[in-house]
Amino acid sequence: MKPFALLALAATTLTLSACGENLGKGQPLNVVSGHIVMGATPDRPAVGYFRVEGGPVPVQLVAVTADLAQRVEMHESVKENGVVTMKPLLRAEVPAKGELIFKQGGKHLMIWGINGAAVRAGKLPMAFVFTDNNNERILFDMVIKPAEGAAAGSEAAMDHGAMGHGEDKAAPDAAKK
Ligand SMILES: [Cu+2]
């Protein structure tokens, strides 16, 4: 009788913990890491990379803004006929329980005119704006790294001046808060 009762208790505990995992809302949508690499010279844009973990529902990242920068754009590096070019990115999918990664050679942020105080502090507070989730806005402090970390072939080393930045209407409105 007694061993049987213990077994039953153990089984109940197992069932409860399994249910708890399924019933929970799971991890929330979140920005889990991110950093910025400064441009080689002050007139060059900095580049930003980060990782977003998806929540219970799929959402789209539609803008990343910073009060302490003049302009922020989302870009994607694409290879066409052996040549890597960059295109403005209007939105990026964050799958439910998946992840969205902006990294070297792929999707990335271009950041112009970072405030000197932010550079000296070594971090830039940024707001990540998502749709389909009540226009949720997640704040994250991006660590600022010096330009010397920029490898050849990375976005930071590429000549963004040749891209015609500022002419496309795809630029996220950094002033809209
Ligand atoms: Cu770019």
Image: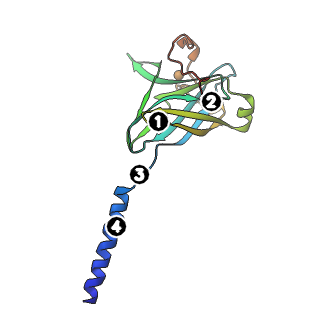
Q: In this rendering, is residue 172 above or below 12?
A: above
Determine if the C-beta at disc 1 is less than 8 A from ligand 1.
no
Residue 151 visible from this viewpoint: no
Distance CA(mark 1)–CA(mark 4): 32 Å
Query: Mark 2 sits on what residue?
Result: 66
Image quarter (top left, top right, bottom left or bottom right) of the N terminus = bottom left
Q: How would you rate the neighbour count of disc 2 (Cα within 10 Å): few for under 14, some for 14-19, many for 20 or more?
A: many
> Which label sits on residue 16?
4
Which image quadrant for residue 70?
Answer: top right
Q: Which badge, 2 or 1, comes first in the chain's sequence? A: 2
Amino acid type of the residue that numbered disc 4 sits on in the rendered structure: Leu
Residue drawn at x 59%, y 30% is: 150
Residue drawn at x 58%, y 39% is: 139
Which image quadrant for residue 72?
Answer: top right
Q: How would you rate the neighbour count of disc 3 (Cα within 10 Å): few for under 14, some for 14-19, many for 20 or more?
A: few
Distance CA(mark 3)–CA(mark 4): 16 Å
Q: Position of residue 36 (x, y in %)?
A: 60, 33
Q: Which badge, 3 or 4, comes first in the chain's sequence? A: 4
Query: Mark 3 sits on what residue?
Result: 26
Query: Mark 1 sits on what residue?
Result: 134
Q: Nearer the viewer, residue 19 or 112?
A: 19
